[in-house]
Image: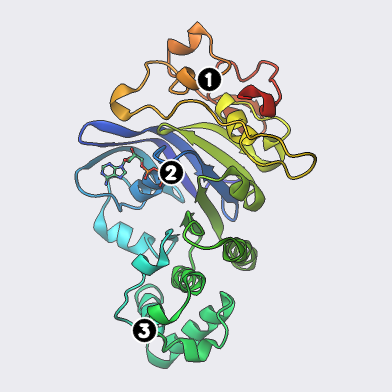
Amino acid sequence: MSAPLVSLKGLRVSFDGQAALRGIDLDVAPGESVGLVGESGCGKSVTWLAALGLLPGRASISGSVKLDGQELLPARPQVLDRVRGGRIAMIFQDPASSLNPVHRIGKQITEALRLHRGMNGAEARAEAKRLLDQVGIPDAARRLDAWPHELSGGQNQRVMIAIALAGRPELLVADEPTTALDVTIQAQILTLLQELRRETGMALVLISHDLGVVADSCERVCVMYAGRIVEQVPTARLFEAPAHPYTRGLLGALPPLHGPRRPLSAIPGGVPEPWAMPTGCAFAPRCAMHVSACDANVPEQVSLARNHRAACIRATLPAPHPETVYA
Ligand SMILES: Nc1ncnc2c1ncn2[C@@H]1O[C@H](COP(=O)(O)OP(=O)(O)OP(=O)(O)O)[C@@H](O)[C@H]1O
């Protein structure tokens, strides 16, 4: 991998003494697309909220977050104000709650242009129209004067993406950007994110609980479980050589693209609560490949191939087919 744009090392977060992140190591290279996937509560959002200094004050954060080699922790407001919305932008699941309902669309985009690119007046308005064109809003000049409630959910998400692009980010973190949208619109937004990445050269981190979504959109997939990354794998290898039993379980739960329909295998059990974390591998109680050694220590990531790492002491063993692991 080229020198990372963003590098997270040993990132830990806890709320009121309960660990939400238990040591995240993750690099994002300039221009690459990385999917972050895992069940609800595994720490996908907290990872990036912590990196961007967006967690509430009672969160306790340690470890390292570097942007182009510059350390961002401990969070300093002057530094983060320049980074957030500038070099790194983040969009969220529900555009309706991210947009300000009492300001017109155009004003919200021009504000971002003023803040991050020092534009004013006519210059900002012309650029706001160009950004709305770029994100595929029809009749962009007229839409600048629309209120958020006059646009559909999909159009509002496009507006949020336009605001994110206003600062010409080197990295866009999209946190479940399509979960609140209906299926056809979801596909359009994911396609738009890919197109924008190609046009602008920015890197993309796509957070989703849906392995299918990230595998379709990203070059590399990071699988999270209970506050740790358990596998990092190039998407091309994900389907042919998944290593962690949790990844195999997620793959087994995907509907087949081809061939006869079969029942989906779901992983039995649930994610452990922070106060009841096993001493060894957090996935051990649900794991179809569990042996007693799994309970001794939290497994470190081992390298399996280029850009492919997994935190499982059994990862190098021949694997049962993903569809049969939890069948
Ligand atoms: N502000 C907060 N205060 C206390 N606990 C929090 C806070 N934000 C997140 N958590 C906890 O941190 C853990 C990780 O949450 P996070 O939102 O990152 O999960 P996630 O993987 O993004 O899940 P989802 O897909 O549901 O958004 C959860 O146990 C959650 O309850």
Badge 3 residue CB within 8 Å of ligand 1: no
Direction from residue 271 to residue 137 in the image, left or right: right
- State whether residue 284 is above or below residue 16: above
User: Marks 2 and 3, how far apart in space?
Assistant: 31 Å
Q: Is residue 188 above or below residue 312?
A: below
Q: Which residue is mark 3?
A: 104
Q: Residues within 10 Å of mark 1 (few under 14, many from 20)?
A: many
Residue, x 49% and y 12% (percent of image)?
294
Q: Nearer the viewer, residue 13 or 98?
A: 98
Q: Position of residue 265 (x, y in %)?
A: 61, 31
Mark 2 vs ligand 1: CB under 8 Å? Answer: yes
Amino acid under label 1?
Cys
Q: Which residue is mark 2?
A: 44
User: Which residue occupies the foreground of this view, 183 or 218?
Assistant: 183
What numbered label is drawn on residue 124?
none
Q: Is residue 271 visible?
A: yes
Query: Residue 287's mark?
Result: 1
Q: Going 42% across and 16% down the picture, which residue do you hit?
A: 280
